[in-house]
Image: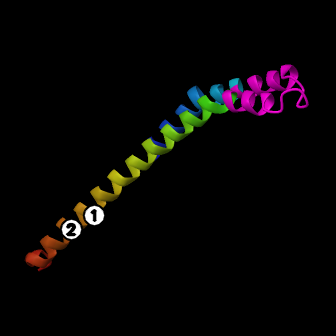
Amino acid sequence: STQLQSALTSLDASHSRPLQKSAYLCMARCVDTAPSSASNPSALPNCLARCSARVDAFQNAAQQAVGGLQQRFGRCAEVCQDKGEAVMGAGGGK
């Protein structure tokens, strides 16, 4: 658990934060340079969405990876519990 937390902290510092910063700077450029909403109403929202696409993809991938690890830990705990109950049920508690 501590190693997982350390890995997530490192991943945040090395990948997530720089991606977020890049996305925010990109969004600021969108606000500065997008045509007015009267002439092209979808220009700004489309630009903002393009800027955040990499962050969204990274966050989804990270959530899937963490979810997969949590499932593996859960299955491992179930196997250990089953083995322990089998030993205790087979006279291991005497």
Looking at the rendering, which quadrant does residue 16 occupy?
top right
The answer to whether 23 appears left or right of 2 in the picture is right
User: Can you identify the residue that label 1 sits on?
Assistant: 78
Where in the figure is residue 15, as x and y percent of width and height?
57, 27
User: Can you identify the residue that label 2 sits on?
Assistant: 82
> Do the residues under discs 1 and 2 have CB atoms within 8 angstroms?
yes
The answer to whether 54 appears left or right of 37 in the picture is left
Q: Residue 59, relative to residue 54: is it above or below?
A: below
The answer to whether 54 appears left or right of 69 in the picture is right
Tell me which residue sits at (38%, 47%) in the image.
69
Magenta stretch containing residue 26, yes or no? Answer: yes
Q: Residue 79, relative to residue 53: is it above or below?
A: below
Q: Secondary structure at mark 1?
A: helix
Q: Secondary structure at mark 2?
A: helix
* Residue at mark 1 to residue at mark 2: CA–CA distance: 6 Å
Where in the figure is residue 6, as x and y percent of width and height?
50, 39
